[in-house]
Image (cartoon, helix red, strand yellow):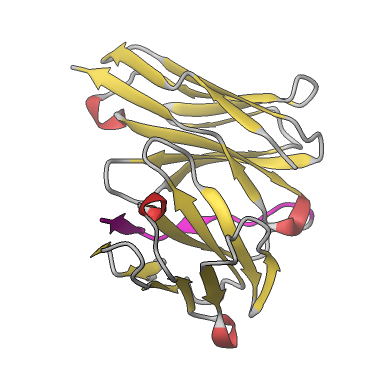
Amino acid sequence: EAGVVQSPRYKIIEKKQPVAFWCNPISGHNTLYWYLQNLGQGPELLIRYENEEAVDDSQLPKDRFSAERLKGVDSTLKIQPAELGDSAVYLCASSQEGGGIFAGELFFGEGSRLTVL
Amino acid sequence: GENVEQHPSTLSVQEGDSAVIKCTYSDSASNYFPWYKQELGKRPQLIIDIRSNVGEKKDQRIAVTLNKTAKHFSLHITETQPEDSAVYFCAASTGNFNKFYFGSGTKLNVKP
């Protein structure tokens, strides 16, 4: 079974330029997440989708970040314009419904490492 | 919201020794606690998890314990090997909302 696929793996841009990251979750996983991971830190949630609906985007800086998950499968995360402080790894993850009251297992992609110069 | 704290931030052990990493959480409604291992430049991968209806779970050399009263859970690695060297993250999830809160990570170094 293919895992969570992300692209590009690495991206170097100058500040104020736009950038987009793409994620293909595991087939059948209805929940998709975008996380931000700074060096030496744990993942921090940016946005969570249940199918095509963004159910939790409270941590997404909406002035410059946007995301979409058309048809409830692939997702794109965009930053425009990028700032120096956006340099980080952007992790995509997916899960399916857990059993009963429990969350399902979270599967991560390899991440997209962004460097803003 | 939930707050997960993880200690220590770095841990160095001799090969063959045991390693213990501890996490605390704040939301008593949290009921699922996974542990992830992340090697340099790689994706975080689930190594073990525990649900709130059990107090301990073991898988070969790794085990996780959960104390719901004290709101803390721990990862135990026995007979450590150099390939165990990585960053380990704990996480807590509340109910079936599929929302995960992560600790800040522990960098484990196993010296041969």
Left or right position of B38 against B64: left
Left or right position of A38 against A70: left
B68 or A48, which is in the foreground? A48
Q: Residue furthest bottom?
A: A71
Question: In the figure, B72 relative to A19: above or below?
Answer: above
Locate residue B4, reporting x and y percent: 63, 33
B18 or A50, which is in the foreground? A50
Locate residue A116, reporting x and y percent: 30, 57
- The part of the image, by quadrant, that contains residue A10 is bottom left
Residue drawn 46% across the image and 28% down it:
B62
**In the rendered structure, which segment of residues is drawn in magenta?**
A101-117
Residue drawn 72% across the image and 39% down it:
B2
Which quadrant: the C terminus of chain A?
bottom left
Locate residue A37, reporting x and y percent: 44, 48
B56 or B14, which is in the foreground? B14
- The part of the image, by quadrant, that contains residue B61 is top left
Question: In the figure, B68 relative to A70: above or below?
Answer: above
* Total residue callouts: 0
